[in-house]
C-alpha cells in the first residue's frame, strides 16, 4: 500500500494541471439538474461532463449530508474527464418529500429505478459512509452494471457499534430522533459555520466555509420543514439493543468489480480494523481491492483533504478505464 501511495503522489507531482477547477457543484460549466419522480417520490440528480465518456455515479452519506455538500470538490474535479452524476438520496438535498419507511430494500429499488430513468447501464460507483454501503449493496445485486467502486468508509462493516445499548436506547426515547434538528434550526449562519468547522480534523479547514455552511443550512431547513428524523431509516433499521441487526459482510464476497477503499486516518466512525477486515474479505473472495489511508483526515475525507482524495479517486478510475494519466508541461 505504501508503494501505491508513493506512485500516486509522484503522479500528482508530475502532472501540472492547467485547467481551472470550479468551486462547488452548482458552478460546474454545463451542469444539468434532473428532478425525477421515481417510485412515488422525487429524486434530485446533478449531471456534468461530456456524454460518451465513462460514467461515474456519486452517492453521499447519511443524516445532514447531500450531494452538494460532500462532493463539493470531487464532483467538479471528476466532471472534467468523466460523465458524472450525483444523486441526492431520498430525504436529502432536493429529494424531498418522501413518505413511508426507507429501508435497504426500498432504497435499492429506488436507486435501480433512478439509474434506469437516467439510462445508466454500466458505470462506476463512488460512495461515502451510507453512500458507500448502498454502493456495496447495489453492486452485490447488480454486478453486471457496476464497472468499479470507490468506497469512502462505508458503514455496516461491523457487528456492533460503540455504546451499542445507549445508541439503541437513544433512538427509542420519544422525541430524541429530532432533537438535533430542533437545536440546529435555531442557530444563525455564524453558529452553523462553527459547527461545520468542528467536524474537520487533522488541521484541515473548509475550502469555502460560507458555501458549505449555506448548504448545511439548507439541509437543516429541509429536515425541519418535512419533519424528518436526524438519522436515516437505513441507519435506524440496523440498530438493535446489543448488536446490529444486519451488516454488509455477507455482501462483500458477492462484489466482482475492482474496488478502492479509502479511510481518513483520524476517523472515529469506521475503525481501521473494520475496513482492514472488509478489504481482506474482498481480496480473499477473488476481488481486486486496494486500501489507501490518508493522514490528517477523518470521516469527511473528500472535504478535509480534497487534493489527495481527488487524485486517488481519479487515478483508480483512470486505471479502471485504462486512461493514461495526464501530463501537461508548462511553458
Image (cartoon, rainbow, N blue to C red):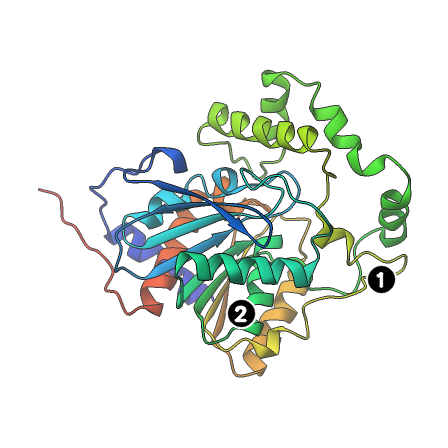
Occupied quadrant, residue 21: top left
Look at the numbered disc 2 and give the secondary structure of its residue.
helix
- Few, some or many C-alpha atoms within 10 Å of disc 1 (few <14, some 14-19, many ≥20)? some
Seen at 49% across and 31% down, the residue is: 206
Is 194 above or below relative to 281? Answer: above
Q: Of helix, strand and loop, which one carries label 1? A: loop
Picture disc at residue 232: none
- Horizontal side, residue 217 vs residue 316: left or right: right
Q: 279 or 127: nearer the eye?
A: 127
Q: CA distance from mark 2 to mark 1?
A: 25 Å
Compared to residue 281, the image places residue 63 above or below, namely: above
Quadrant position of the C terminus in the picture? top left
**Up-down relation of residue 181 to residue 97 (above or below):** above
Q: Position of residue 304 (x, y in %)?
A: 51, 40
The answer to whether one can see residue 161 in this image is yes
> Residue 153's x, y, as percent?
59, 56
Q: Is any atom of residue 197 visible in this view?
A: no
In the displayed orientation, state which residue is furthest to the left.
331
The quadrant holding residue 39 is: bottom right
The residue that appears at 70% across and 25% down in the rendered structure is 184
**Depth order, front residue of 316/78:** 78
Give the image location of residue 274, x and y in percent. 68, 64
Residue topped by disc 1? 243
Q: Is residue 170 left or right of residue 62?
A: right
Residue 190 % position (x, y)? 59, 16
52 left or right of 228? Answer: left
Indicate which disc, 2 or 1, sits on the residue closer to the N terminus.
2
Q: Which residue is mark 2?
A: 139
Looking at the image, is mark 2 or mark 1 nearer the viewer?
A: 2
**Dot 2: few (<14), some (14–19), or many (≥20) neighbours within 10 Å?**
many
Total labels: the figure holds 2
Q: Quadrant of the rendered structure where residue 32 is?
A: top left
Amino acid at each position: 500500500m505504501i508503494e501505491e501511495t508513493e506512485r500516486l503522489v509522484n503522479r500528482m507531482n508530475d502532472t501540472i494541471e492547467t485547467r481551472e477547477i470550479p468551486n462547488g457543484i452548482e458552478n460546474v460549466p454545463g451542469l444539468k439538474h434532473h428532478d425525477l419522480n421515481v417510485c412515488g417520490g422525487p429524486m434530485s440528480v446533478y449531471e456534468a461532463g461530456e456524454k460518451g465518456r465513462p460514467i461515474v455515479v456519486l452517492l453521499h452519506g447519511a443524516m445532514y449530508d447531500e450531494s452538494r455538500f460532500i462532493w463539493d470538490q470531487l464532483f467538479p474535479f471528476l466532471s472534467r474527464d468523466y460523465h458524472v452524476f450525483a444523486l441526492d438520496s431520498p430525504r436529502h438535498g432536493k429529494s424531498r418529500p418522501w413518505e413511508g419507511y426507507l429501508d435497504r430494500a426500498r432504497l435499492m429499488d429506488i436507486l435501480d429505478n433512478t439509474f434506469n430513468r437516467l439510462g445508466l447501464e454500466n458505470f462506476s460507483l463512488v460512495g461515502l459512509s451510507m453512500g458507500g454501503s448502498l454502493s456495496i449493496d447495489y453492486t452485490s445485486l447488480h454486478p453486471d452494471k457496476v464497472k468499479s467502486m470507490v468506497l469512502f468508509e462505508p458503514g455496516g462493516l461491523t457487528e456492533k457499534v460503540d455504546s451499542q445499548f445507549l445508541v439503541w436506547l437513544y433512538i427509542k426515547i420519544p422525541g430524541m430522533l429530532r432533537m438535533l434538528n430542533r437545536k440546529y434550526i435555531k442557530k444563525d449562519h455564524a453558529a452553523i459555520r462553527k459547527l461545520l468547522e468542528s467536524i474537520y480534523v487533522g488541521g484541515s479547514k473548509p475550502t469555502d466555509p460560507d458555501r458549505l455552511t449555506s448548504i448545511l443550512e439548507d439541509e437543516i431547513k429541509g429536515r425541519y420543514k418535512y419533519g424528518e428524523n436526524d438519522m436515516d431509516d437505513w441507519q435506524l433499521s440496523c440498530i438493535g439493543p446489543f448488536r446490529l441487526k444486519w451488516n454488509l459482510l455477507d455482501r462483500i464476497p458477492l462484489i466482482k468489480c475492482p474496488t478502492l477503499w479509502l479511510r481518513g486516518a483520524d476517523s472515529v466512525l469506521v475503525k481501521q480494523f473494520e475496513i482492514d477486515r472488509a478489504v481482506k474479505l474482498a481480496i480473499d473472495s477473488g476481488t481486486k481491492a486496494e486500501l489507501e489511508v490518508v493522514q490528517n483526515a477523518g470521516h469527511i475525507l473528500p472535504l478535509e483533504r480534497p487534493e489527495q482524495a481527488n487524485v486517488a479517486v481519479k487515478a483508480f478510475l483512470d486505471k479502471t478505464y485504462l486512461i493514461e494519466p495526464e501530463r501537461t508541461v508548462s511553458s
